[in-house]
Image (cartoon, rainbow, N blue to C red):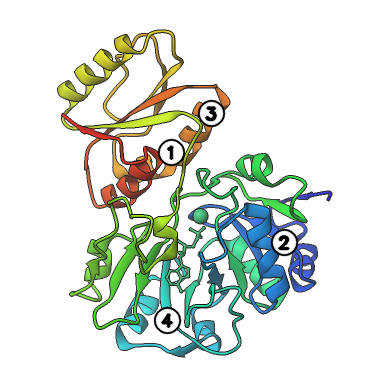
Amino acid sequence: METLIFKGIDNIEEAGRIIADGGLVAFPTETVYGLGASAYDSGAAKKIYAAKGRPSDNPLIVHIDEPSRIYELADEITPDAQKIINAFMPGAVTVIVKKNAKISGDVTAGLDTVAVRCPSNEIARALIKASGVPIAAPSANISGKPSPTTARHVMDDMTGKIDAIIDGGACEVGVESTIVDTTGEVCTVLRPGGVTLEMLREVVPDIRYDKNITRAIGENEKPKCPGMKYKHYSPNADVYVIEGGEKEVQAEINRRISENKGKNIGVLFMYGAVYDGAVMLGAGGGGKEYAHNLFAALREFDRLNIDVVFAEFREADGWAQAVKNRLYKAAAYKVIHV
Ligand code: AMP
Ligand code: MG
């Protein structure tokens, strides 16, 4: 299949028509690029799973162009859900709510709940408006690979498999939305992201993290957020997280570089660049910059045929959980505390 490339907002009506006709369009959002199809078309939703190689029990997020449109999809909005919607939509938050009958089971992987998000990115909202339907969209990467934060990343993974890609430049946030389950007795964060726990606590004080956020999930476990159990964000390189203070982290990485002579080594640095014999990419000093740079850096290391990546990490701020969640998975939980 030929994949059309659209620049920014220019071909938004055509892109909207492709979605309305049951096609697949990748589009920018403020978090990562999404791979969209009509949420009212179960055949189109199935095509998303095929293009990504995504396990069929991992549901999609439904994107709307106005926060109030969540009432068209939900059976029930709890008072806490409403507070989160009022405070953070449009934005990098997804709420899980009880679904109504309009949304196909292929979108929600058979669950009786639906994940809903209203992006703040103007191209994303214009696309939803132009298509006339809510858009079901997971991240626009091959399943298991780092999420795409530029149109180039999407082209690398999806050219020939989908109808169109809208190039809207680099994504501002760089990691996926915060997912909040609002269907239980207390709200729980199933995936940390662009809206931090501290921000959420200002409107829903008793909200907490789900216990599965930074640990490996066993094969036979059934986490609330099906995506938690899958291999995620894995570059070809073997990634190790080296976590701790500056001196200790640098000593440990230098030791490991000398142990791995003959391999192509990459360092994702947070503190500074003091390594000989490694390709170095900067993650940025704070969590927000780290989130913005992480996926692009993992993909760049692959492009450079790096065998082993050592990633410097420390919990710097409220973004630490969002970064840690992805970084630990990229490293398959190979985390060294020094
Ligand atoms: P992606 O946008 O590719 O990160 O995928 C969407 C994420 O949302 C996956 O981790 C899903 O497991 C999660 N998700 C989508 N719908 C639901 C739902 N109804 N309940 C819990 N998690 C969901
Ligand atoms: Mg994804």
Q: Which amino acid does label 1 sit on?
A: Asn
| Residue with the mark numbered 1 | 293
Closer to the eye: label 4 or 1: 4
Name the N-terminal-most of marks 4 and 3: 4
Q: In which quarter of the image is residue 150?
A: top right
Are the two marked residues, 2 and 1, in contact with CB atoms closer than 8 angstroms? no
Closer to the eye: label 1 or 3: 3
Q: Residue furthest right?
A: 2
Q: Is mark 3 on a helix, strand or loop?
A: helix
Q: Residue 97 carries which label?
A: 4
- Measured in 3D between alpha carbons, the distance from the residue under mark 2 to the one under mark 1, in whole angstroms, is 27 Å
Residue beneath the point at 70% across and 59% down? 25
Q: Is mark 1 on a helix, strand or loop?
A: helix
| Residue with the mark numbered 2 | 24
Q: In this view, does 329 lie above or below 60?
A: above
Q: Is mark 2 on a helix, strand or loop?
A: loop
Are the two marked residues, 4 and 3, in contact with CB atoms closer than 8 angstroms? no
In the rendered view, does 146 fall on the left or right side of 164? Answer: left
Q: What residue type is labelled 3?
A: Asp
